[in-house]
Amino acid sequence: MSFLKKILGKDDHEFNVAPSEIVFHKEHTGAVEDRIKNLWKISLQKFADITEAYLVVADFGKENNPHPVLCLFPRPNNHIPIVNLLSENFKEIFGKDQFVDIIFLNQDLRVKCANVCKPFYLRVPGVIQKESLDDEKGLCKRCRHPFSPHIVIAYDTKDFSKGGEMRCPVKDCTCFNTISFNLNK
């Protein structure tokens, strides 16, 4: 039994909307939105199937009720782990379970969505993306605390190729990132 079946008494396919009914209006932006986008960028790197992600204001034709929608391209074979992780990220930012609409875009919807906003996540096949963990103001992109006191821990100080982790030292902050070390510089 699916998550939606348990919660709402309907199967996933009952929530499908005809692509022609979906209207994309504009990119959904703001400070809080930037925080969730940054967290989602990190999480999406775990799923090679997903190459693009958009946070857009959209409505589903008959509803005429524009609201934020997370759009992912393309639809993977198994979308459940992606939905679960992104939902956990959402809870981490907002502190409670909330439901965000997720649309897995086909090629036609991808073009329509890309015409109104740019992807906040873009994976180029075969290229490992390395993104800064702090912003231009020196704040951690994940928890928004000053980045400079964050603690970096190597898993093995004799073999840095094993990577490590970074944690925020602020009391009760749950900020955590796995990291890799660039030994070529």
Image: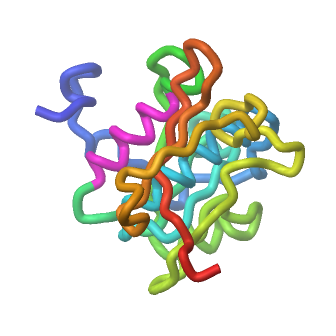
Number of dots carrying numbers: 0
Query: Is residue 94 positioned above or below 114 on the image?
Result: above
**Residue 84, horizontal then vertical, whole percent:** 33, 38
Residue at position x 31%, y 64% from top? 76
**Residue 64, horizontal then vertical, whole percent:** 66, 36
Toward which corner of the image does residue 83 lie, by quadrant? top left
Query: Is residue 150 positioned above or below 119 on the image?
Result: above
In this view, the residue farthest toward the right is: 137
Residue 85 on the magenta span: yes
For the N terminus, the quadrant is top left
For the C terminus, the quadrant is bottom right
Residue at position x 54%, y 60% from top? 20
**Is 10 left, or right, of 163 in this rendering?**
left
**Is 118 left, or right, of 136 in this rendering?**
left
Q: Main secondary structure of the magenta part?
A: helix
Residue at position x 47%, y 27% from top? 99
**Residue 3, horizontal then vertical, whole percent:** 23, 30
- In the foreground, 18 or 114: 114
Toward which corner of the image does residue 61 lie, by quadrant? top right
Query: Is residue 169 positioned above or below 46 on the image?
Result: above
User: Taking the image as drawn, is residue 123 in sight?
Assistant: yes
Query: Is residue 183 positioned above or below 153 on the image?
Result: below
**Numbered range of the magenta stretch:** 79-90
In this view, the residue farthest toward the left is: 1
- In the foreground, 114 or 127: 127
User: Taking the image as drawn, is residue 64 in sight?
Assistant: no
**Residue 155, horizontal then vertical, whole percent:** 37, 51
- In the foreground, 119 or 155: 155
Residue 112 on the magenta span: no
**Is 149 left, or right, of 59 in this rendering?**
right
